[in-house]
């Protein structure tokens, strides 16, 4: 019984094992989730470390250019834009890769000196980088642009030059070759596992280590940003940004999420699957073991008990020779019990056979004795000349014949019921035969019967049969005294919980209040009715005949 419901042994064992393994499984799953989160954090930390390593290497170029800008702004020839300005730039500021050019402009935006030659009258007024630098007092970094002097895609790093009065006196700028930045990040070891890109603060791609970025750079990035980007093929990439040059440029480093999380995901799946596989294998082992060690033997024991229930006590002890000791012991007990039952059954059968033989002998002797008594009464009646005495002997003989009939009928049905009984139809039919024979001198009187199907125990059949004998005898004797033709009808009916026996004739009636109603036959019928816990009524009419009716409860039949 499990939660009010009957279950099998297998199901019970499986539930017990599940209950035992469930806490371990839940703990393992929770630990796996915690490990998964820790691995995610570790993977993101590794991603950030790679991004920082790239930024540290690439930041050197910007630091050098910024340093050179400050040195140049302090150099007298460059600051004052003397005739030696170009020479100073070419000799002292060349060869700092990826810086490919330095340019000095005056306050009006015209180029005054440069490492790379430029056309006369070149002006940068209106250029975004020059306008931004004019308003700033710190180094500015431009958006990717095409260099007017270098004729290459560059990033311009510029610094405003102030005169002795602190007024704007032009700019000094450095052009960083974007293609050289691209080669630098392409050669980085981190490029073998991910994508490296340099992003401006406006979200524009400056350069990357690949010709075609697998994803679109999300807008609004800032230093320390991280997240997940989806490619057009819906592949997820994890990225992180690190400051490269102030808040103007950032290094973005990204790796495929499946790759960076592969080890963590594999371990997470293993930590989830292994407990489930363990539970499954445990359940299979229990299922197999229970079936082999218990269920199949219990099935055989049940089959054995069914055979014993059918009365086949032969059994087979050797069939349980390989069973577990406990079940083998139970089998031995069942076989021993079956042997005892078989032995006792044989003894009881022998005793019953003996009893049956003795009962038959008793019945046979009682039958013979009743026949002897009947014969003696018949002989005595034939020798008596007094009519009253002869009538009394005949009535006694009829009563004894009725008793013999009950005895014979119950004896014939003895093997069909635990308690001897007699069917009313059979009883009334046999009584009709006997009473016709006993009153064969009244051949003109027809005796008939009708009866509902009913079985009576012998204790009830005896008074009922004697009642019928007395009532029918009275009709033969008093209703048709001169051998007049007529009929006598016997009817037995069941009405609800009552039984009604009616004996009617169409002979001459009598006065129910006269002496006939108080004779011996009437008194006997009243006595028989009392034995059946019933009542008897007598109705008679001089012209219509007589009726004797017995009412008794059906419960008396049980």
Image (cartoon, helix red, strand yellow):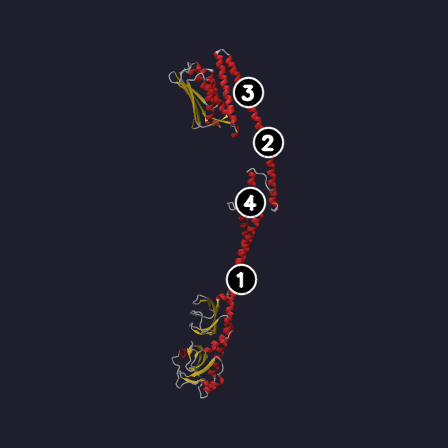
Q: Residues within 10 Å of mark 1 (few under 14, many from 20)?
A: some
Mark 4 lies on a secondary structure that is helix
Q: Residue 547, image x and y in percent?
A: 41, 20
Q: Residue 473, image x and y in percent?
A: 45, 18
Mark 3 lies on a secondary structure that is helix
The residue labelled by disc 3 is 369
Q: Residues within 10 Å of mark 2 (few under 14, many from 20)?
A: few
Give the numbered dot on residue 299.
4
Q: Residue furthest top?
A: 385
Q: Residue furthest left?
A: 543
Q: Earlier in the sequence, mark 3 or mark 4?
A: 4
Q: Nearer the viewer, residue 73 or 191?
A: 191
Marks 3 and 1: which is nearer the front? 3
The residue labelled by disc 1 is 267
The CA distance from mark 3 to mark 1 is 103 Å
Q: Earlier in the sequence, mark 3 or mark 2?
A: 2
Q: Residues within 10 Å of mark 3 (few under 14, many from 20)?
A: few
The residue labelled by disc 2 is 350
The CA distance from mark 1 to mark 2 is 78 Å
Q: Earlier in the sequence, mark 1 or mark 4?
A: 1
């Amino acid at each position: 019984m499990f939660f009010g419901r009957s279950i099998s042994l297998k199901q019970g064992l499986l539930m017990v094992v599940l209950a035992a393994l469930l806490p371990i499984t839940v703990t393992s799953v929770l630990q796996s989730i915690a490990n998964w989160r820790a691995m995610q954090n570790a993977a993101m930390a590794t991603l950030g470390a790679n991004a920082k390593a790239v930024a540290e290497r690439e930041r050197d170029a910007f630091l050098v250019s910024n340093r050179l800008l400050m040195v140049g702004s302090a150099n007298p020839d460059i600051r004052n834009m003397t005739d030696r300005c170009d020479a100073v730039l070419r000799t002292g500021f060349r060869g700092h890769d990826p810086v490919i050019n330095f340019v000095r402009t005056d306050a009006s935006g015209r180029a005054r000196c440069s490492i790379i030659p430029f056309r006369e009258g070149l002006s940068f007024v209106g250029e975004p980088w020059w306008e931004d630098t004019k308003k700033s007092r710190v180094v500015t970094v431009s958006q990717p642009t095409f260099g007017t002097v270098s004729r290459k895609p560059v990033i311009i790093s510029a610094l405003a030059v102030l005169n002795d009065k602190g007024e704007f006196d032009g700019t000094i700028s450095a052009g960083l070759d974007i293609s050289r930045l691209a080669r630098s990040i392409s050669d980085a070891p981190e490029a073998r596992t991910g994508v490296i890109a340099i992003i401006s603060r406006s979200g524009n791609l400056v350069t990357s280590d690949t010709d075609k970025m697998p994803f679109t750079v999300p807008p609004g990035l800032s230093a320390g940003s991280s997240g997940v980007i989806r490619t057009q093929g819906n592949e997820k990439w994890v990225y992180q940004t690190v400051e490269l040059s102030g808040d103007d440029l950032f290094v973005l480093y990204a790796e495929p999420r499946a790759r960076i999380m592969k080890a963590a995901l594999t371990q997470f799946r293993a930590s989830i699957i292994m407990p489930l596989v363990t539970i499954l294998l445990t359940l299979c082992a229990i299922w197999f073991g229970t079936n082999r060690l218990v269920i199949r033997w219990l099935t055989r024991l049940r089959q054995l008990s069914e055979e014993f229930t059918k009365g086949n006590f032969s059994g087979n002890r050797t069939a349980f020779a390989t069973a577990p000791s406990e079940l083998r012991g139970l089998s031995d007990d069942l076989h021993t019990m079956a042997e005892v039952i078989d032995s006792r059954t044989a003894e009881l059968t022998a005793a019953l056979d003996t009893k049956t033989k003795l009962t038959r002998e008793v019945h046979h002797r009682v039958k013979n004795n009743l026949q002897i008594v009947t014969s003696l009464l018949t002989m005595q009646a034939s020798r008596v000349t007094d009519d009253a005495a002869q009538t009394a002997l005949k009535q006694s003989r009829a009563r004894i014949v009725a008793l013999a009939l009950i005895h014979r009928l119950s004896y014939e049905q003895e093997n069909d019921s635990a308690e001897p009984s007699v069917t009313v139809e059979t009883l009334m039919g046999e009584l009709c035969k006997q009473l016709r024979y006993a009153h064969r001198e009244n051949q003109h009187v027809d005796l008939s019967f009708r009866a509902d199907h009913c079985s009576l125990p012998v204790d009830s059949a005896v008074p009922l049969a004697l009642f019928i004998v007395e009532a029918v005898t009275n009709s033969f004797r008093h209703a048709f005294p001169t051998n007049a033709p007529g009929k006598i009808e016997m009817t037995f009916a069941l009405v609800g919980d009552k039984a009604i026996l009616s004996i009617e004739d169409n002979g001459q009636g009598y006065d129910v209040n006269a002496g006939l109603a108080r004779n011996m036959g009437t008194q006997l019928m009243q006595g028989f009715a009392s034995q059946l816990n019933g009542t008897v009524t007598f109705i008679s009419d001089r012209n219509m005949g007589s009726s004797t009716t017995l009412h008794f409860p059906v419960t008396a039949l049980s």
